RNA sequence: GGCCCAGUAGUUCAGUUGGUUAGAACGCCAGCCUGUCACGCUGGAGGUCGACGGUUCGAGUCCGUUCUGGGUCGCCA
């Protein structure tokens, strides 16, 4: 039977006991990590959030405590009172290893069944079990450390922004559906039958309204929601560090955020980040790395072979170029011997998932080249390729010919995949950069119109304002992403604060005035009454923490994450609604067409 | 929606070409043990081989379907 505390007070954390406590009588409370029963002596390792301390139970001191201790098992909750003594034999592996508590009183506060997972860092339980019993999983020192690190990072951010004069302001969670974005989580309402709130994908519009309201510098560490498919670094609810500031230009936003990032690295990991961070226009990032979030920790950069192959006999290349596509290649320098035929097959499969039709390759050896396409290339073309790729013996060249998007996607992914396979990615190296000058619009062929690449309130670059109407495909935005080791950490933009320009934007997006008013009328209305120029940024806190500690997925830094199906294995959410509740909400369920 | 990977004691895994009673380690239970700290020793319990269907004299193993979890493409302004 569990015992009551009845006035027993904890005096110390287990993990804090040191030699300076020797001679003191202390009371510890925690979970049984391990029991070692030697017959006439029982040792218990007691664990709390700060660490583990050894308790020694001796029947000569207290028969009652000893008898109770003998009956404990892993994860029992105990309150132990006793004197701190120097150990007879020291355990150098733990910080408390020089001392132990000589127990004279024991209360078994809570018994525990045999847990389904081992509560140790060495536990290898699968994720399914870990998530179902997350409360046990979170008892592991490793998980405690991760979540406390996460708190530390968010506190550093909060403190920094406070120093800079930012004000933490809350925005509604029950809000309006976002047009043109990710899928929203919809929330029905009893008092507004037939109408729906949406959970915010970001507090974007409200933070802009705060700027209209004159708060000048706003921030919030806030949950955002997207009903989209999950990935290793994506959850349906995630935490953003949302920032907005007034009377600023792009440079001001970047400069402030760089210092924020610098502070986070310094105060959380002790890593020095040199400022200013490198900046790379979107166009350059795509051309060199095939990605708008380049991992710059290694080379293998993309090079264009268009000039060399535009008129090649080999139609696969020349026809692609003539029809508006491109031929690009990467050089896996010095890796020729590490790439077997089988590996090439798999790499070809890999690039095909990105839409590539094939993967051409040239192996460069001391004797010459080896390549399935050698026979289709003239001597000059081959020579040109090798020169462009700066190829030397031992190099391995991969070539993709296709329309631009496919070439960038497949080669961009391939260079990262190769770096992974060759173990060239160092988790302790942090390559940060800003990608700037994003396109303002993105053309959607299915919809037959332009969409805002960032969002429709993003300001075009000053020199591209005319292009919003005349040449939207080439208009660049005052938008920027912060990229860390090939992962998009966050992004933002300078917003449009001029109603006329905003109208032009909507027009370019093919939105009618009625649509615009229905969806964003409140914002446009607000902009009529005096709007400061403003801009901001939003960071993914989960991703940031994940990268800082080198975790392999975002779930490792979230206390109660969801599965790939957006379910919670612990609570079994989402669940079916009560019939009465549905009636109140005026909702009737119908079978989906696919069922 | 597509593709790929995994599912065998409480946990992590092994299980040959389809062949008798499905194994190991840790954990658990019982006994012994006064300085352990991965305590030790002895003994023991514990399995719908994810589920359903099929092939076969015979299926953990082969085939199909399905469920669960993961990775990924699409998607994620």
Image: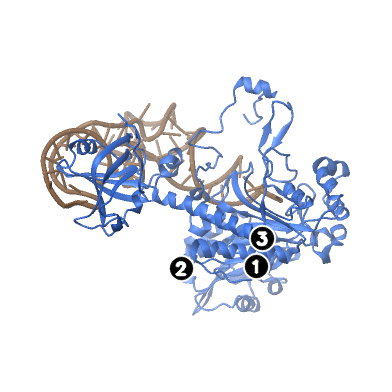
Chain colours: A blue, B brown
Q: Is residue A587 visible?
A: no
* Lateral position of residue A235 relative to residue A455, left or right: left
Quarter occupied by the C terminus of chain A: top right
Q: Nearer the viewer, residue A585 or A354?
A: A585
Alpha-carbon distance for marks 2 and 3?
35 Å
Circle 3 is placed at which residue position?
A481
Residue A129 image offset from top left, x and y in percent: 42, 40
SS state under label 2: helix
SS state under label 3: strand
Circle 1 is placed at which residue position?
A328
Alpha-carbon distance for marks 2 and 1?
22 Å
Alpha-carbon distance for marks 1 and 3?
25 Å
Q: Which mark is residue A338?
A: 2
Which badge, 2 or 3, comes first in the chain's sequence? 2
Q: Does A233 sit above or below residue B7?
A: below
The nearer-to-camera label among 1 and 3 is: 3
Q: Does B71 sit above or below residue A309?
A: above
């Amino acid at each position: 039977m569990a015992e009551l505390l009845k006035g027993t007070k904890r005096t110390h954390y287990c993990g804090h006991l040191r030699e300076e406590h020797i001679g003191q009588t202390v009371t510890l409370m925690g979970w049984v990590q391990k029991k070692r029963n030697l017959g006439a002596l029982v040792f218990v390792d007691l664990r709390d959030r700060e660490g583990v301390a050894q308790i020694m139970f001796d029947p000569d001191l207290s028969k009652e405590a000893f008898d109770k201790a003998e009956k404990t098992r892993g994860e029992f909750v105990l309150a132990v009172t006793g004197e701190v003594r120097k150990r007879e034999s020291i355990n150098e592996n733990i910080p408390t290893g020089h001392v132990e508590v000589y127990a004279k009183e024991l209360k078994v506060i809570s018994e525990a069944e045999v847990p389904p997972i081992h509560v140790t860092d060495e536990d290898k339980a699968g994720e399914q079990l870990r998530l179902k019993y997350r409360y046990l999983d979170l008892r592991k020192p490793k998980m405690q450390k991760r979540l406390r690190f996460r708190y530390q990072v968010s506190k550093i951010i909060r403190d920094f922004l406070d120093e800079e004069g930012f004000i933490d302001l809350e925005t509604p969670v029950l809000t309006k559906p976002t047009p043109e974005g990710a899928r929203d989580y919809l929330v029905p309402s009893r008092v507004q039958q037939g109408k729906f709130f949406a959970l915010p994908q970001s507090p974007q519009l409200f933070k802009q309204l705060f700027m209209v309201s004159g708060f000048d510098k706003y921030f919030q560490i806030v949950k955002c929601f997207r009903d989209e498919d999950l990935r290793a670094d994506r959850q349906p609810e995630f935490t953003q560090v949302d920032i907005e500031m007034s009377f600023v230009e792009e440079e001001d936003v970047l400069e402030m955020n760089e210092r924020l990032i610098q502070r986070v690295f310094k105060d959380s990991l002790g890593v020095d980040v040199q400022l200013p961070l490198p900046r790379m226009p979107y166009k350059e990032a795509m051309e060199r790395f095939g990605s708008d979030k380049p991992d710059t920790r290694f080379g293998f950069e993309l090079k264009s072979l268009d000039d060399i192959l535009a008129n090649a006999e080999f139609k696969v290349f020349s026809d692609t170029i003539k029809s508006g596509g491109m031929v690009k290649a990467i050089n896996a320098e010095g890796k020729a011997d590490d790439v077997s035929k089988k590996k090439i097959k798999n790499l070809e499969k890999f690039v095909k998932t990105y839409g590539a039709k094939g993967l051409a390759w040239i192996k460069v050896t001391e004797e010459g080249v080896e390549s399935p396409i050698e026979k289709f290339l003239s001597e000059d073309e081959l020579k040109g390729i090798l020169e462009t790729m700066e190829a030397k013996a031992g190099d391995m060249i991969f070539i993709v010919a296709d329309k631009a998007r496919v070439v960038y996607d497949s080669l961009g992914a391939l260079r990262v995949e190769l770096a992974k396979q060759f173990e060239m990615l160092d988790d302790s190296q942090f390559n940060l950069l800003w990608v700037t000058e994003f396109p303002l619009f993105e053309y959607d062929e299915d919809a037959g119109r332009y969409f805002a690449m960032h969002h429709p309130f993003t300001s075009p670059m000053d020199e591209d304002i005319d292009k919003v109407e005349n040449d939207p495909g080439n208009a660049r935005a005052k938008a920027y992403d912060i990229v860390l080791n090939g992962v998009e950490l966050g992004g933002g933009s300078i917003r449009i604060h001029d109603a006329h320009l905003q109208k032009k934007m909507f027009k370019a997006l093919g939105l009618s005035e009625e649509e615009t008013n229905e969806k964003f009328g409140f914002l446009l209305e607000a902009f009529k009454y005096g709007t400061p120029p403003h801009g901001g940024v939003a960071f993914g806190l989960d991703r940031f923490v994940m990268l800082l500690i080198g975790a392999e997925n975002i779930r490792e830094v979230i206390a109660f994450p969801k599965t790939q199906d957006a379910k919670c294995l612990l609570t079994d959410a989402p669940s079916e609604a009560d019939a009465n509740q549905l009636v109140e909400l005026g909702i009737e369920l119908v079978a989906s067409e696919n069922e």
